[in-house]
Every structure is written in C-alpha cells, then in structure tokens.
Amino acid sequence: MTGGTTPGWYLRRLSRMGPREVGGRVGDTLRRRRWRSALPDAPSVTGARFTAVLPAGTLAAVPPDAAKRLLAEADRLMDGQAEYFGVLRDDLVAPDWWYDPKTGRRAPSGYAFDVPYRDEDAVGDVKQIWELSRHHHLTVLAAAYAVTGEDRYAERVAEHLRSWWEANPPLRGVHWVSGIELGIRLLSWVWVRRLLEGWEGASALFEGNPVAQQQIWHHQRWLAAFPSRGSSANNHVIAEAAGQFAGACAFGWFPESARWRADSLRSLERHLRSNTFDSGLNRELATEYHGLVLELGLAAVAEADAAGVPVPAAVLLVLLRMTDALAAVVDNRLRPPRQGDADDGYGLVVDGTGTDRWSSLLATGDAVFGRLDWWPTVTGTDVRTPLLAALIRPTTPAAIRPAERPAHFADAGLTVLRGPEEIWCRCDGGPHGFLSIAAHAHADALSVEVRHDGVDVLADPGTYCYHGQPEWRQYFRSTLGHNTLQLGGADQSGSGGPFLWTRHARSRVLTADTSGQGVGRWSAEHDGYRGSVHRRQVQLTAASRELVIVDEVQGPRQDVRLAFHLGPAIAAELVGNRVELTWAVDGEDRAAVLDLPEQLHWQAHRGATDPPLGWYSAGFGRKQPATALVGSGSMDGGEGLTTVLAFQ
C-alpha cells in the first residue's frame, strides 16, 4: 500500500494549507532540487572540544534498581537483541540500517528526497527502519558504560556509529527524509558523547573525527533548511528544534553554530507555546505526544544550562504547566489517558525495560520545578532523572500553580471524574486535534475512558499502526473504535488520509462539575453529523459506585451504533442487554455490571478482522483481541440511551 500519496491525497492535503505554508513548501522543493547536485563539505574544524559533561558525582545518584534495569537492557543489546513495535530482532550486533524486519524489505538507496518512504511495498515499514536509527539503543549502551566503566559498551557504541555514518552519508537514503528523525538522532549523539566521557576513544570518535563532524554539521544544516511548517508544525517541529539546539550547544564547533543555536531556541520557544494549551495539556490531544514534547523540552533546557545559554521564561513556564497537567490527569497507577495517536516515541532513552515513562517524567518535574502537595506519589526510579537534574538548574518560573488537583481542562475539553476505590473516568469534549490536518487526532468526540484501580474497564483501544495497513489505521482512529455513538455508519470527522482530517467535529462542554461533593457530572455535545447534534451526559456517584451515561441525538431519526470497548483484562458475559464483567488486580477478584440501553440490539465482538472490531493496542505495532460491545438500532431525535456501569 502506498499510504495515501495519490493525486487526490495531494489535493486534499493542499486544501488544508494556507498561502504562507504553500510558499514555504515551494521553497523547500526548489531547495531539494538544488541540494541534489550541490552537497557542500562541512567547514574544517580543528581543536574542537566537548565540554558539556556531567558534573562530578552525578552517576552516584543513579538508584541501584534503575541501574540494574539499565544494565540488563544493555546486555540484551550487546547480544544483538531488542524489540521494536512488537517485532523481535536478534541481528543488532552488526545491524543493516536500512532493513525492515517486519516485512523483510530493505529501503532503496539514492537521493534522500526521492525515497518513497510512505510506500511500504517499496521501502518496508518505515517506522521499523527509522526507530533503530534514532540511536536510543546507543544512549542505553553509553549509559551502561558511564555506570560501569566497562569498555565493551563504549566499543559497541563506536562500532555502530562508524557503521551508521558510513552507510548513511549526507542526503543519501531513508534516514535523511524526516526532520523529526534527524532531530532526535542528533540529541542522542549529544548524550552518547556525554556518557562516553572518560572512555579513551570518545574524543577520537566525535570531535577528533572528520566524519562525525560532517554528519553533525549536515544534520544541523538540514534541520535549519527544512523545518516542519504550517499545518505540520506539531510535535515534529519541537523535535527538530530541540535536536538542533542540543547539537548547536554541545557541538558548537562550526561558524554557523551561534546562529543555529539562536534560531532553534526561538523556534523551540514559539512552538512549545503554540503546541500547548494554557492549561498545560498538549494541543494534539494525543497523550504520548504530550510525553514526547515534555521530554524534548526538558532535554533542551538541560543543554542550555550545560552551555550557559539563558532559557526564555516562556519555555520554562510551558514545561512547568505541562508537568503539573500530567500530574493532574494520571490515574492512581500513574497512567495518563490513552487519547489520540501513540507511537511509542521517546526523546531521550537512558533506561532499561520496566522503567515507567510517566513516573520518570514526574520525578524529573519534581527535581526541576518541585512537586505540589496534591501531586500523586512517585515510587518508581529511573536513570534519566538524576542525569537531567544534574544539568538543569532548579527553577521556579513566575507562575501561579494550581492549589488543588485540576480535574477539568476547559481549553482542552478534557475532564477527569474520580470516585472511590480508584475509579477514574476521562470525558472528551475537546477540539478535534491540532492545526488544520489534526494529524494525530481520532474521531472520538464525547468518548469516555474508565479505569478501576488502574485497570482499563471501558478502554480507549489505542493506535496500533500508521503506514501500510490502511484498514487497521482507519479502525483504530474511527468513531466505532471508541466509546461513543456513531450515526449513519459514518465517522464524526472526515478523513482524507492516514494523518489528514478534512472535516473536524466541533465539541463543546456544557457541564463539568468536579467539586468532589460525592457526585461528579459532565455533559457535552458535538456537531460532527450534519443535521444532528450528539449530546452526552456522564454522572459518577461515589456512594453507589455507579457511572451513568446518557446519550441523546437532536435531529431526524437515523441508524445508530453505540460502542463500549473493554480492556484486555476484562472477561465479559453478555445476556440480553446486561454484561457481567470480571477481572483481577494484584490477585484480588473484581467485578462490575454493565447495563446497556435496551432499545438497541447488543452483540459482543472479539478479534474480528473483516472488518476489524474488538481489539486493543497496548503499544505501537502490537494488538490483542479484546471485547467490544456494539448496540445497533434506530433512534428518534430527543430519545435517550442510558448506560449504567456499577462497580461491585
């Protein structure tokens, strides 16, 4: 499959651009043509030094259990083993950097901008190919060297870098196509060099190596020339700016370094602000990208402080608000909402498997900004927090922080209702994603997500894939693929491609009562169906431990489907319109009863493939069967459909 690059797709994509963006993209096209035949050499650099090292004593602060996880991961990598997006690899002792282990295909060579990276038949799964070349595995190996002093880790890092640089000369091949990949890779190189400080070969590998200098210079030249623009200026532009800023600070050896540093910092400030609601939530309303942007922002601040570059107050304020917002929305197990797209993307990886991403971010936020009294307790440990905290100067931006835990984020349309025994319910009444294409949005207006003690009961099914499997991409971001109401067999918003929405449902929250007086109430509506308005009310009553959902449609009579997706841990027995739910938490049996609207005919679906229905994706590239309850029927305008979830 070609992933949507037909003439029709180009026309739909063009329709979502403004004049300024169109002009910028025309300039990009002309520049790519010039660069095809005019590849300059990087300026000759002599006497380069790397000074952005960790302060003395930093590594002693790494918790022993975090170090143990790190070394276990590093040793698996030394054996050539890793898992990327559900695909196990055992060929990483000497990897082929252009190989996709999922399809068995190898990306074509040639001029970077000629590579049809969206075409899985020609390239393979580009996410599989790109992920290894973000070089997160090398930051893990370099961290293992830093913790142990064992040369074998550093030597493997050097082997891989030299191999990658030889296989991927500037502007040749698939790894020079996407700015987010260059930005994250450049940040990884900064940390590889930092963590290899003390190894006798570190200087010869980087500042004393003309090949490394060429690669670093060309990465920054590329990032300066081709920023993500206009309708694409989402998390990608943050990664591009953060990576270039990190490189210009830590590898500031070139005549252009001061300009690159200043320009990328301005871009970072501008786009952190534009990508973030005033409440602190990321505007893409895709939680994993909130995490990615926060990681990248904190890493950029670390480079600024290490280089003595002043950080604009606006940058620190955005990162503070993002951290407080994350602390506010997580459940009792520190799991945030599963909202919008998620592709397991990280900004900086120095930890082993088993380290919790969200716990790590909150720990870093505590070290940098200080925790508030209402923050949840963070019990996990990680390697990254003490490393970042050693570089970032503790700061308290001039801001009024929430005195109590926020539950309603009006600008993002996100509300969290909380009940006894750790009942957690997210209600979605926010915008349909960010910018004109809303690339990482799902058609999930008015959906709910319910957990009990951290277990998904009514689950957001996740994302699973981006390129190459259009039927699965469509399902996981569809209206039917979420806990909401579908009218007339259509999605609430109109899709024009795998990262393109041409029609956006507009939602508004009508009620958000989270005062904590024993009953939480929320209601909202959206206009995604022309001629009809879907309105939903949710009420969580603490005393009865009941969640009541009422759906109404204002408009003509039409066919409806109401879906509720259960988490993979939930066993379900459907009889008529009543469902007995059972599961276990830490060896303790739990149960609930779900009474569904009797006006609809209910069926349970699990693991269906034609078409897809009844699936849960715990992470990118991974899916497993889970029960989806779908009620079908017709509905008159003004009629109400009542669903009651009672925890026993």
Image: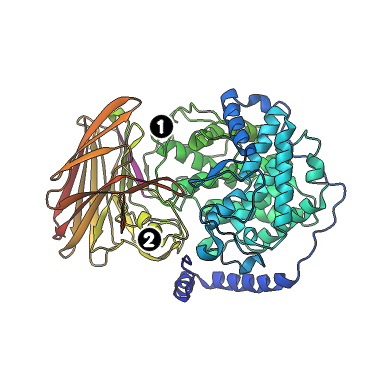
Quadrant in which residue 531 is drawn: bottom left
Would you say 290 lies left or right of 134 here? left
Rendered image: mark on residue 471: 2
- Is 415 part of what is drawn in magenta? yes
Placement of 586 over or under 476, stated as above or below = above
> In the rendered view, how is the structure colored?
rainbow
* Residue 201 position in % (x across, y down): 80, 39
Rendered image: mark on residue 257: none
Q: Residue at x 29, y 49 (%)?
A: 483
* Residue 618 position in % (x across, y down): 41, 43
Q: Three-letter amino acid code at disc 1?
A: Arg
Q: Observer-nearest residue: 72 or 586?
A: 72
> Which-is-in-front pick, marks 2 and 1?
2
- Callout 2: 10 Å neighbours few (<14), some, many (20+)? few
Which range is magenta? 413-419
Rendered image: mark on residue 333: 1
Would you say 416 lies left or right of 214 here? left
Which quadrant is the C terminus positioned in?
top left
**Helix, strand or loop status at disc 1:** loop
Magenta span: predominant SS is strand
Placement of 380 over or under 283, stated as above or below = above
Q: Residue at x 40, y 33 (%)?
A: 404
* Residue 327 position in % (x across, y down): 45, 36
Q: Observer-nearest residue: 471 or 300?
A: 471
* Residue 396 position in % (x across, y down): 58, 35
Q: Three-letter amino acid code at disc 2?
A: Glu
* Residue positioned most to the right: 46
